[in-house]
């Protein structure tokens, strides 16, 4: 999840003189890519990771089944920067409770990486 400071930097980047100079030379805004946003947990709505990641300059890749679900009952409206303060409050609560999100993310990334390595070696 992007931090508040990275969101602020991103939203204000296009108004800074340095960015304006780069854009005048043909630079493009970097676009976040949300990859394979199908819902893996059947208890969650099948468009959860599509409906909640809609915003300017974003790209979302989806499997066919998620595309079909989105066409059928998805909600096409800007959501990526809605309820940001509420999300920040949730993150602060987790931190106060002693949840080490950096450690969880590092562990998750490490496991995901080793899982991919195992999958490649067994092909």
Image (tube, rainbow, N blue to C red):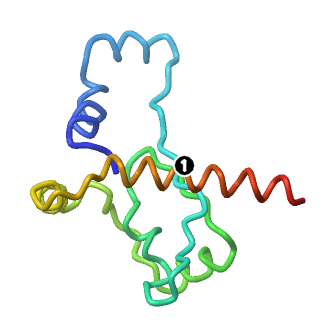
* Labels in figure, total: 1
Q: Quadrant of residue 6?
A: top left
Residue at horizontal 67 percent and vertical 70 percent from the top: 63
Of 87 and 70, which appears nearest the observer? 87
Residue hosting label 1? 110
Q: Quadrant of residue 37?
A: bottom right
Image-based side of 7 in relation to 28, left or right: left
In the rendered image of this protein, does residue 16 appear above or below residue 38?
A: above
Residue density around tag 1, few if under 14, some if 14–19, many if 20 or more, within 10 Å: few
Q: Residue furthest bottom?
A: 43
Of 19 and 108, which appears nearest the observer? 108
Residue at horizontal 16 percent and vertical 54 percent from the top: 95
In the rendered image of this protein, does residue 121 appear above or below residue 8?
A: below
Image-based side of 28 in relation to 5, left or right: right
Q: Position of residue 82 (x, y in %)?
A: 22, 60
Q: Position of residue 107 (x, y in %)?
A: 46, 52
Quadrant, the C terminus = bottom right
Of 56 and 40, which appears nearest the observer? 40
Residue at horizontal 78 percent and vertical 59 percent from the top: 119
Q: Position of residue 24 (x, y in %)?
A: 44, 13
Residue at horizontal 44 percent and vertical 85 percent from the top: 45
Q: Position of residue 86 (x, y in %)?
A: 13, 62
In the rendered image of this protein, does residue 107 appear above or below residue 4?
A: below
The local secondary structure at tag 1 comes to helix
């Amino acid at each position: 999840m992007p931090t508040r400071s990275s969101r602020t930097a991103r939203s204000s980047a296009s108004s800074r003189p340095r960015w304006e100079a780069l854009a005048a030379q043909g630079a493009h805004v970097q676009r976040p890519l949300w990859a394979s946003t199908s819902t893996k947990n059947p208890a969650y709505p099948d468009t959860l990771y599509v409906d909640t990641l809609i915003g300017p300059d974003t790209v979302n890749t989806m499997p066919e089944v998620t595309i079909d679900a989105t066409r059928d009952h998805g909600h096409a409206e800007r959501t990526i920067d809605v309820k940001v303060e509420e999300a920040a409050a949730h993150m602060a609560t987790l931190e106060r409770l002693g949840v080490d999100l950096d450690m969880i993310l590092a562990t998750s990334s490490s496991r995901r990486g080793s899982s991919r390595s195992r999958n490649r070696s067994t092909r």
